[in-house]
Structure formats: C-alpha cells, structure tokens
Amino acid sequence: MEEGSNISRRRRTALTEGSADYKLKRDEIVQAAVKLFKEKGYKSTTLSDIAKRAGLDRATVYYYVGSKEELFHEAVKGILDENVIEAERLLRVTTMGPREKLERLIERLMTSYEENYPHVYVYIQEEMFEVEGERTPWAKQMVRQTRRFESAVSTLLDQGVTQGIFRDDIPVRLAANAIFGMFNWTHRWFKPGGKQTARHVASAFCKIFFDGMQDAKQP
C-alpha cells in the first residue's frame, strides 16, 4: 500500500513537472495501449499486456499511468473537443450554405479518425454506448461534447430543410443518425494506408447522403 501510494505521488509530481522525456514515454505507453485495445478489446487487455507491448514491467507502467482506464481516457481526450470546436465554428460561418458546411464537417470527422487511428475507433468499438451510463467527470464531459457535436449536425440539417436544400419528409434526427451510423461503422473496416483514404471515404459518404437528402424540387 505504501509502495503504491509512493508511486502515485511520484506520478503526480512527474505529470506536474511535465518533462519531455516523461511525456514521450507516457505517450509511447498510450500508443501501445490503444493498439492492444483495438486488437484484443478493451476489456480483454490487461496492464501486464500493455507493459509487455511497451517493453516495460508492470511496476514501471504505474509510474506513468494509474490504471487501464486512465490510458483509455488519455487516448481519446481532446479528439472530440477538436471536432466540436470545428462544428461550432462552421455554424458561425456566413459564406457557406448548410450543405457545404456539412461536407466540410464530414471530411473533418473522417480525417480526424484517420489522423488519430486507432484512438477514436477504440472509443467507438468499446465504450461509446456505455459512457452515458457512467457518472465519472470524464464520462459526463464526453456525453456533453457528443451532444454538442450532434446538435451542430442537426442544426445544419434543419437549416438545409428550411432553405429548401434538403427534403422535408425525412426527420432531421433520423438524417443525423444516418450520418453518425455511417461513420461509427467504419471502425470495422477502415484502416489508414489502405486503398481508400479518409478523404475518399468522406467524399463517398457525402454522395450517398446528399443524393438521398436532396429536395426533389432542386435542379
């Protein structure tokens, strides 16, 4: 118990001081963890597995992270925040219409999946649907950010319907869920470096979605 408390104190001190070497090693452990989460599943991966993949012993891993949960949170934090900021920025843009804004947002989302692979996919694959039931500060923040992003997408769709760009016989919420559904399923088949880049996938999704959503009265 004393040893564990001592390691915790040393970890907090190291995090506060934030040396470059400490951050680099911590990032390496996070990378090792997310790869294992993707390969084996979050629940099946142990800290011992992560330590072995990172080339460390379990005790050393505790100097950098306190738990498997902390590693998971570290892996996905910030990514959703960046996408929310971009979505809300697009809402304020006055030089683009709703369709162009959604196209930009769809490309941004898919690109962020590619750039942060497999971090986001681990979240989607393992925890996304369980987070709403949690009461931890991290879970509450993730739920808030997810709802902000969903709200931005729904607002753009609603604007498109109001302006006669999108058809009005499909509920906005259903249309938004179609977008999220396309993206959330990519964790099963998309991998960076393959035949299809994130931009190729985003372009295909836009064609599928907007061809279906275009108002019949539009030329």
Image (cartoon, rainbow, N blue to C red):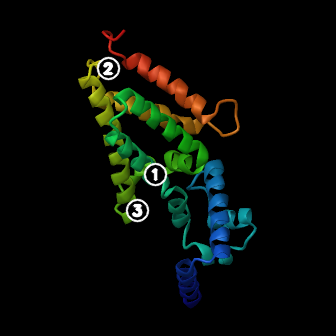
Residue drawn at x 35%, y 39% is 93
Crowdedness near tag 3: few (<14), some (14–19) or many (≥20) residues, C-alpha within 10 Å: few
Q: Alpha carbon of mark 2 to alpha carbon of mark 1: how far?
A: 28 Å
| Residue 82 numbered mark, or none | 1
Circle 1 sits in a helix, a strand or a loop, which is it?
A: helix
| Residue 28 numbered mark, or none | none
Q: Earlier in the sequence, mark 2 or mark 1?
A: 1
Type of amino acid under label 3: Trp
Q: Looking at the picture, how far across and down is residue 171, in whole percent?
A: 27, 25
For the N terminus, the image quarter is: bottom right
Q: Nearer the viewer, residue 8 or 164?
A: 164
Q: Which residue is mark 2?
A: 165
Residue drawn at x 44%, y 37% is 105
Q: Which residue is mark 3?
A: 138
Residue drawn at x 39%, y 55% is 142
Type of amino acid under label 1: Glu
Crowdedness near tag 1: few (<14), some (14–19) or many (≥20) residues, C-alpha within 10 Å: some
Type of amino acid under label 2: Ile
Identify whether 163 is placed above or below 36.
above
Mark in front: 1 vs 3: 1
For the C terminus, the image quarter is: top left
